[in-house]
Amino acid sequence: MRETVPVTVSRPDDSVGMPVLVGPTAVGKSSLGLALARRLRQDGVKAEIVNADSMLVYTGMDIGTAKPSAAERAEVPHHLIDILDITQTATVAQFQQLARDAIADCRRRSVVPVLVGGSALYVRAIVDDFEFPGTDPELRGRLEDELALVGAEAMHSRLAALDPDAAARIEPANGRRIVRALEVGALTGAPYTAQLPSRTYLLPGVTQIGLDLARPDLDVRIEQRVDHMWDEGFVDEVRRLEAAGLRAGVTASRALGYRQVLQFLAGEISEQQARDATVYGTRRFARRQDSWFRKDERIRWLPALADDRVERAYRLLR
């Protein structure tokens, strides 16, 4: 019989710390977050999930983002989910403040915040000593006009010539981030990646836990997830969101899967091509995510498929 250690939580960051669960898409971060919150509860420790995924913030984008179910969110409170309309755009700086506010609120209530996210930039913006370079509205406007004229891929090629490291981190279709990288480079005279701070935690008690899965196994899980999305009515979800203004959403319309289905609905590609492109794009994105996280030596890696992964994560917090 497993022995449990009673815990009295007066300051969560000093007792069990703040778990930060990271890794590529489809590796099982959300399910581990829920299981870890339940495990903490067994020892009398309240825990809540703080989302660090930029697409879960959008109301109505449920199937394509594998959003936690209503039952899961009722069992364990989740923060920063369904807080924006699909036509709105949240910057990383805005997300940073919202997440830090949610974490501070948890700590005021003696609740352990469990941060769950697949974006290295968003996670680092939240937990690290991370300040954002300024902006120049006139320069930004010129770059956005150029983006509208020549397209994201041409702008990405320009970025690759000026700042290869930044281009490697940014999707060729992500015009907003390409413009931002070009803007920062022009303003600072230095590569966009040079503006990223050293890896120094600003928030106390952080324990980063990464889920490790062999690439072939992850590829299978991604394809299974996309199949499940289609079975659950993903195309109909995108069709409803299109009627609600999805194409006007600078960020939401470019989400993996949503972008491809919008192309299908516009008659540009077949439904099968949309499905295949979603699998391919998600696999590429997962590889980049994994590469970004592997560069952070502070992350403690656990096998994603281990039967005892919850207990192993729990022990890391202790």
Image: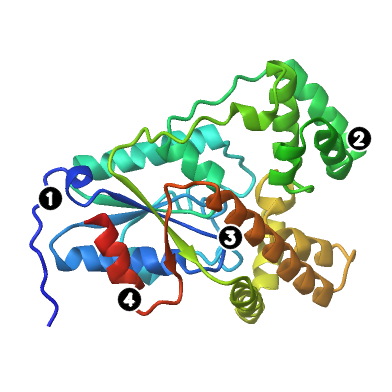
Could you say whether the residue bearing mark 4 is in a helix, strand or loop?
loop
Q: What residue appears at the point 36 percent right and 69 percent down from the top-left corner? A: 72
What kind of residue is marked 4? Asp
Foreground label between 4 and 1: 4
Quadrant of res 26: bottom right
What kind of residue is marked 3? Met
Foreground label between 1 and 2: 1
Q: Which residue is mark 1?
A: 9
Q: Measured from the top left, where is residue 312 in percent x and y? A: 30, 67
Q: CA distance from mark 2 to mark 3?
A: 29 Å
Q: Is residue 127 left or right of residue 293?
A: left
Q: CA distance from mark 1 to mark 3?
A: 35 Å
Q: CA distance from mark 4 to mark 2?
A: 53 Å
Q: Which residue is mark 2?
A: 149
What kind of residue is marked 1? Val
Q: Is tag 4's residue or tag 2's residue first in the polypeptide sequence?
A: 2
Q: CA distance from mark 3 to mark 4?
A: 32 Å
Could you say whether the residue bearing mark 2 is in a helix, strand or loop?
helix
Could you say whether the residue bearing mark 3 is in a helix, strand or loop?
loop
**Residue in front for this viewpoint, 191 or 149:** 191
Q: Which residue is mark 4?
A: 308
Q: Is tag 1's residue or tag 3's residue first in the polypeptide sequence?
A: 1
Q: Are marks 2 and 3 in contact (CB under 8 Å)?
A: no
Could you say whether the residue bearing mark 1 is in a helix, strand or loop?
loop
Q: Are marks 1 and 3 in contact (CB under 8 Å)?
A: no
